[in-house]
Image (tube, coloured by chain):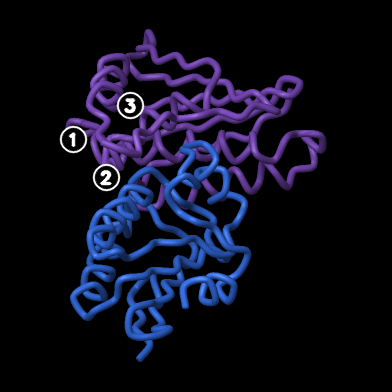
Chain colours: A blue, B purple
Amino acid sequence: MQVTTMSFTVEPCNQETVIVRIGKALDFRNAAEFKSTCQTQVRSGARNFILDFSETGILDSTGLGSIFSLYRQVSPLEGQVVFAAVSRPVQVVVQLTRTYKVFRQFPSVEAAEEALQ
Amino acid sequence: MESVKQRFTDLNTIIDGVHSLFDQFQMSGLHPSLDEDAVLQAKLAVHEWTANLVQHADFEGRIPWVVVDIWTEGDRIECVIEDNSNGFDLERGLVERANGLSSIPERGMGLLMLKACTSRLEYTKTEDRTYRLEFTVNGGQDPCLDIPFSS
């Protein structure tokens, strides 16, 4: 079942994997909502998160912190957080913080889905 | 030297306003040879500072105002952000956050991102008792915020 919050849409791929469509921004204004949305998914059994950044113009330090929080939650469960269709503004943050060392990136959501199957 | 400049008085809408200002800066056609990543780094730096103002600044009951001014000098982007808050000990904040950065940190990265993106960063109190952040972002650079990824 697709779940839509104020800022994000969550679509299940399979029992353990979900796609989170980030939308226009993940920043200090909606990072708490992102964390809460992801926590709900983890409680429901999701371990792998594909973050779709195709429409995202803003990723700031608080938004990145909320992704790190998700990573801390799913790592002990042998889950993964991966980035898909990364927009240029998000890529600038990824490059600045070298977070490609932690989060695998895929050119599209479909490519990420295939890799996580 | 032409700049884009805007005064903001509503902290609820300033973030979207700042991003629109950068869109205006990019679409003005005045800076065709400017490195796109440098523009995005400057935008991130302004976003982090204004986010810091929205979340933490003390305006002591005054109607807040923030003025953002952006222009170029060759391949450099220059930004000035002035506000009427009570200011902030930026130097101390940077040292504390750098020393306190944990592995896979969930917070404390904003000012460090701002510092990492900029080649010159100055924060001063003006004669009018306002606070002024000035910084430069150089084109063609690959700035790095060194985040610890393992314990």
Q: Are marks 3 and 1 in contact (CB under 8 Å)?
A: no
Residue A36, x across and y down, in percent: 22, 67
**Element type at mark 2:** loop
Label 3 to label 1, Cα distance in Å? 11 Å
User: Do discs 2 and 3 share a chain?
Assistant: yes
Q: Disc 1 residue type? A: Gly
Residue B84 - label: 3
Residue B106 - label: 2
**Element type at mark 1:** loop
Would you say B108 lies left or right of A12 here?
left
Q: Residue furthest bottom?
A: A1
**Is residue B63 visible in the rendered structure shown here?**
no
Circle 1 packing at 10 Å, graded few (<14), some (14-19), many (20+), is few
Residue B92 versus residue B99: which sits nearer the camera? B99
Residue B39 - label: none
**Along the polypeptide, which appears first: circle 3 or circle 1?**
1
Q: Disc 3 residue type? A: Asn
Check the picture and name the quadrant holding the N terminus of chain A: bottom left
Residue A94, x across and y down, in percent: 51, 45
Residue A97, x across and y down, in percent: 46, 38
Nearer the viewer's eye, disc 2 or disc 3?
Answer: 2
**Along the polypeptide, which appears first: circle 2 or circle 3?**
3
The residue depicted at 39 percent of the width and 37 percent of the height is B50
Q: Chain of mark 3?
A: B
Would you say B129 lies left or right of A91 here?
left
